[in-house]
Amino acid sequence: MTHWMTDSTPPDDQSDLAVKPRSRTQRPPMYKVLLLNDDFTPMEFVVHVLERLFHMTHAQAIEIMLTVHRKGVAVVGVFSHEVAETKVAQVMELARRQQHPLQCTMEKE
């Protein structure tokens, strides 16, 4: 790969060399993925979802599942918009295929 700086002739378009003032790069907004409690989805299935889709240990998955059960909702992870959207879709698809009414949503952090 040749860099123009190693060439003996400067580039024709000098506008590429204009220095732009540095602005602080903004961190993209993050999104919380939430599991919602229902009275029908088996606890074992929720644990399975947390282990499989959120890569939690069995102990972590049980703890989150119990939080969902007791409080009605729990944050299962915080991700970029695209990743959060994908995780929600994966949970909903897995629940639908197993005919469970488990609900998963996302909200801006």
Image (tube, rainbow, N blue to C red):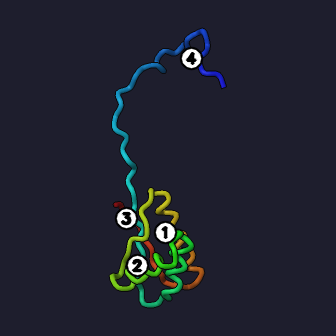
Q: CA distance from mark 2 to mark 4?
A: 57 Å
Of the image marks 1 and 2, the number of the one nearer the N terminus: 2
- Per the image, the residue denoted by label 3 is 107
Contact, mark 1 vs mark 4 (Cβ under 8 Å): no
Q: Nearer the viewer, mark 2 or mark 4?
A: 4
Q: Residue 5, labelled with which disc?
A: 4
Q: Amino acid at mark 1?
A: Val
Give the structural element (helix, strand or loop) at label 1: helix
Give the Cα distance between marks 1 and 2. 12 Å
Counting residues from the start of the chain, the first of labels 3 and 1 encountered is: 1
Earlier residue among tags 4 and 3: 4
Q: Which residue is labeled 2 in the image? A: 36
Q: CA distance from mark 3 to mark 2?
A: 13 Å
Three-letter amino acid code at the position of disc 3: Glu
Relative placement, left or right, of 74 versus 85 is left
Label 4 Cα crowd, 10 Å radius (few <14 / some 14-19 / many 20+):
few
| Residue pictured at 34% horizontal, 60% vertical | 109
Q: Disc 1 marks which residue?
A: 88
Where 98 sits versus 50, above or below? below
Q: Give the Cα distance between marks 1 and 4.
A: 47 Å
Neighbor class of circle 1 (other Cα within 10 Å; few <14, some 14-19, many 20+) is: some
At x 40%, y 22%, the residue is 19
Mark 4 or 3, closer to the camera? 4
